Image (spheres, rainbow, N blue to C red):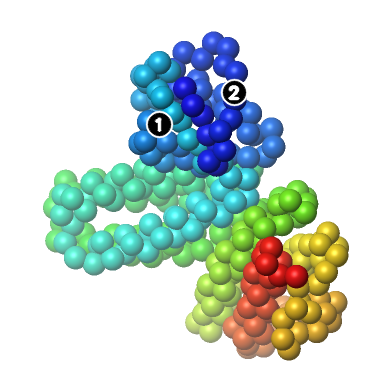
Amino acid sequence: MEMYINNQKINFSFTDEKNVLDIVNSIEKWVGKDNNIIAEFNINGKDYYSIEAEDLKKIKPETVNIIKFKVLSVPSYAVAVMLELNNYFTNMKKVFANELTPEKYGMAVNGLQWCKKTFSSVLTVLKLQAEGAFILKDMHEMEVELFRLKNRNEKNCSDVMQKLIKVLMEKMHFFCIKINIKILEKNLQSLSLNNIPEVAEDSYKLLDMTEDILVRAAEKMQSGKDAEALGLIRDIMELFIIFSHLADKIIKIKGSDPFTLQEGNGSFKDFNSKLVAVLKTVESALKENDFVQLSDIIEYELREYTEKYKSFFQYAGSDKVE
């Protein structure tokens, strides 16, 4: 049996693995020592993104010629899953724009089961099981509602599902920032010269998510939902502080400042000083309950800093930049 991890052939000694589940578990323990996780794997040319343990037990090692594993760091895995989940629910809104057919129903049920399992795995690796339990509960309730709508064949089932998906997506977006903070903290702890490209790519994707969160936070304040926005704003501030620490550490490791390589930018030190001043203004506005100023800062100024950081991480992760 040939085995590959991220297209690199490996020699792995097995002891008493009786089936493919045992093999996968052994590899998972091995890569887990370096804070990595199996994202997906391929057996004899067939991809497996999610498979039940009982099915893997049925596959005997002697029937397997080749297994290829895609392994990611825990932060990169979490980023990839959150993007996939967001894409899934965005697509589901389109699916339920019209009548619920048997084909759409099957797709939705299978998709929700995948969402629960995958999101649960992210909560586990980031140690956020308690905090994210309400999202899993909502996913389960949506699944129950799907069964109910199918059995009753209700005419307005598309409208009902659209509303459920909208509510769940909103909760996911706001909880996403807590996940982003955890991911950045892990990347900050493990940052080295070797993994700067991976960390920079993760950070770029997280900043894409952050842009959407900033827009939603501003919308909350503009619609008078100040209480819902307050906790989110504090999380946003924490997120930008970690981005700042991460950028500073990358500069120290690389020995160069990617900010100075971009036309029109000063040094990172200058940029960071301006960001700190903006965050202090946010803190003052929070104390004074000045939601008009908060909305303006979040919608315009922090979005501008988001773009600057995206440019920074794009340069920092590129080996082509001298």
C-alpha distance separating marks 1 and 2: 16 Å
Q: Quadrant of the C terminus?
A: bottom right
Q: Is 135 displayed left or right of 254 in the figure?
A: left
Tell me residue 171's x, y (percent).
49, 61
**Of the pair 9 and 141, the residue shown nearer to us:** 9
Could you say which disc has been placed on residue 168 in the image? none
Which residue sits furthest top? 16
Mark carried by residue 43: 1
**Residue drawn 71% across the image and 66% down it:** 316
Q: Residue at x 63, y 78 (%)?
A: 307
Is 237 placed above or below 10 here?
Answer: below
From where the camera sits, is residue 217 visible? no
Q: Name the residue under label 2.
A: 12
Q: Where is residue 54 in the image (x, y as percent from the top left)?
A: 38, 23
Q: Is 235 left, or right, of 27 in this rendering? A: right
Q: Circle 1: is it few (<14), some (14-19), or many (20+) Cα within 10 Å?
A: some
Residue depicted at 37% across the width and 64% down the height: 90
The number of numbered discs placed on residues in the rendered structure image is: 2
Q: Which amino acid, by three-letter code, is at mark 2?
A: Phe
